[in-house]
Image: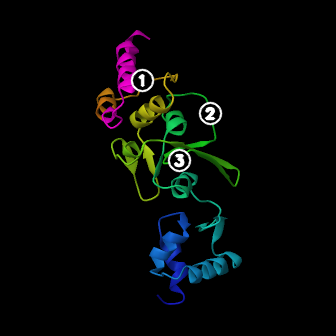
């Protein structure tokens, strides 16, 4: 790669968040020290923005959901974040909730990210996930099931937008009898509300 091509390779990308590993692949460079030196140079010159250690963006206007997926991977946006966006819970929260292989709360530049551990077989199943280049996010049905899987008895303000056929299709990845019983009970009672 030519000297002037390193920065332009990042700037041409559709992504807004880059880890040092991403940059290594993009630049086809194995020398981690050379990558860090070059990235630090671009940050000092104002060409790139350092979000936190090993994470960079083109500027301060990076996608917070993309960062949520990049901090701990594999992961996907789910739980209250999706449920609030879909109108299934009405209480607003600025916390971005993420399904991941660990439980952890992280604050980066004033934004709080809440990671909830979910079983690996569920985490890696693509059913009900919308995966794009920037980040992965659960459908309303997947977020509904994730919430009941991790918080039995959770109260939803509205279930009107759910596609119950999708709910029952996705339910099979959980392999959880308690969850199956709870979903069947909610399905039977949904028309009584």
Cα–Cα span, label 3 and label 1 = 31 Å
Q: Is residue 191 magenta?
A: yes
Residue at image coords 49%, 70% = 22
Cα–Cα span, label 2 and label 1 = 19 Å
Question: Which sits in the foreground, 54 or 128?
Answer: 54
Q: Give the residues drawn in magenta, as a range.
A: 170-193
* Residue beneath disc 3: 102
Residue at image coords 61%, 29% = 91
Question: Which sits in the foreground, 182 or 48?
Answer: 182
Q: Is residue 183 magenta?
A: yes
Please say if 116 is above or below 63.
above
Dot 2 alpha-carbon crowd within 10 angstroms: few under 14, some 14 to 19, many 20 or more: few
Dot 1 alpha-carbon crowd within 10 angstroms: few under 14, some 14 to 19, many 20 or more: few
Residue at image coords 46%, 58% = 134
The part of the image, by quadrant, that contains residue 60 is bottom right
Q: Earlier in the sequence, mark 2 or mark 1?
A: 2
* Residue beneath disc 2: 92
Q: Position of residue 71 (x, y in %)?
A: 56, 57
Give the residue at the far bottom of this rendering. 2
Q: How is the image coloured?
A: rainbow
Question: Which sits in the foreground, 14 or 17?
Answer: 17
Looking at the magenta stretch, what is its main secondary structure? helix
Disc 2 vs disc 1: Cβ atoms closer than 8 Å? no
Q: Comparing marks 3 and 2, which lies closer to the viewer? A: 3
Horizontal relation, residue 116 to residue 131: left or right? right
Tell me the quadrant of the picture where the C terminus can be found: top left
Dot 3 alpha-carbon crowd within 10 angstroms: few under 14, some 14 to 19, many 20 or more: some
Residue at image coords 54%, 87% = 4
- Circle 2 — which element? loop
Cα–Cα span, label 3 and label 2 = 24 Å
* Residue beneath disc 1: 160
């Amino acid at each position: 790669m030519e000297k002037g091509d390193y920065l332009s390779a990042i700037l041409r990308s559709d992504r807004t968040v880059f880890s040092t590993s991403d940059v290594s692949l993009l630049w086809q460079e194995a020398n981690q020290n050379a990558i860090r030196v070059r990235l630090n140079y671009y940050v000092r010159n104002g060409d790139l923005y350092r979000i936190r250690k090993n994470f960079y963006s083109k500027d301060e206007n990076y996608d917070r959901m993309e960062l949520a997926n990049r901090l701990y991977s594999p992961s996907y946006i789910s739980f209250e974040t999706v449920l609030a966006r879909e109108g299934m819970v009405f209480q607003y929260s600025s916390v971005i909730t993420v399904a991941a292989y660990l439980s952890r709360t992280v604050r980066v530049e004033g934004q709080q990210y809440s990671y909830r551990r979910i079983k690996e077989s569920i985490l890696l199943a693509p059913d009900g996930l919308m995966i794009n280049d920037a980040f992965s996010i659960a459908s309303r049905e997947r977020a509904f099931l994730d919430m009941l899987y991790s918080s039995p008895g959770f109260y939803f303000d509205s279930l009107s937008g759910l596609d119950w056929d999708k709910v029952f299709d996705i339910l099979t990845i959980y392999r959880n009898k308690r969850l199956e019983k709870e979903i069947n009970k909610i399905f039977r009672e949904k028309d009584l509300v």
